[in-house]
Amino acid sequence: MKTNVELIEEAKKTAQNAYCPYSKFPVGACVLYESGNIYTGCNIENSSYGLSLCAERNAISTAIAAGEKSKLLKIAIYSPKSKKCFPCGACRQWLQEFEKGQNIQIILEDNIEGICLFNINEILPYSFELI
Ligand code: THU
């Protein structure tokens, strides 16, 4: 299993591939599954701004397209333009979709505090669920 530091390093590397000519705000994400597999994603923008894809959703989409079936355990998110790069509301809801009691961990890096850990239930309380 990759360590939290290694997952942040993967997110950092992937942020370098971001396509963000409009915001100039690169983001990289790396998801870790119970299988030990990891998948990465970066943000991809579009001249029709609302069509832009966040790094987190790109990483999760890549995992699913690759056939990953085990539980999503962790996501590391990094932007060189942000202190702690918290996921947007839409990405929180995407993470919540794959929450199966494992309380998915969110790994962020802060240039002063270093690695900071959160979990999905903490950053998205009272989330929408179809019961
Ligand atoms: N962005 C992400 O990739 N993830 C987030 O959780 C929030 C924002 C991207 C979208 C856009 O390309 C850029 O950051 C600025 O909003």
Image (spheres, rainbow, N blue to C red):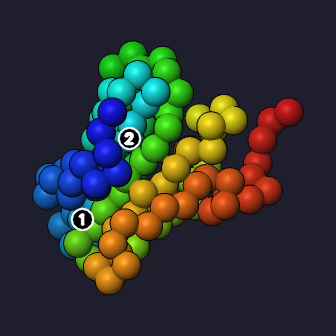
| Element type where label 2 sits in the image | strand
Circle 2 residue: 31
Circle 1 residue: 26
Corner quadrant of residue 41: top left
Residue at 39%, 37% (x, y): give it: 32
Q: Residues within 10 Å of mark 2 (few under 14, many from 20)?
A: many
On the image, the x and y values in percent for residue 31 come to: 38, 41
| Element type where label 1 sits in the image | loop
Q: Which mark is residue 4?
A: none
CB of residue at label 1: within 8 Å of ligand 1?
A: yes
On the image, the x and y values in percent for residue 38 come to: 31, 33
Vertical placement of residue 40 versus 15, above or below: above
Q: In screen coordinates, is 59 left or right of 16?
A: right
Residue at 66%, 32% (x, y): give it: 100
Q: Amino acid at mark 1?
A: Pro
Q: In screen coordinates, is 7 left or right of 85?
A: left
Q: Amino acid at mark 2?
A: Val
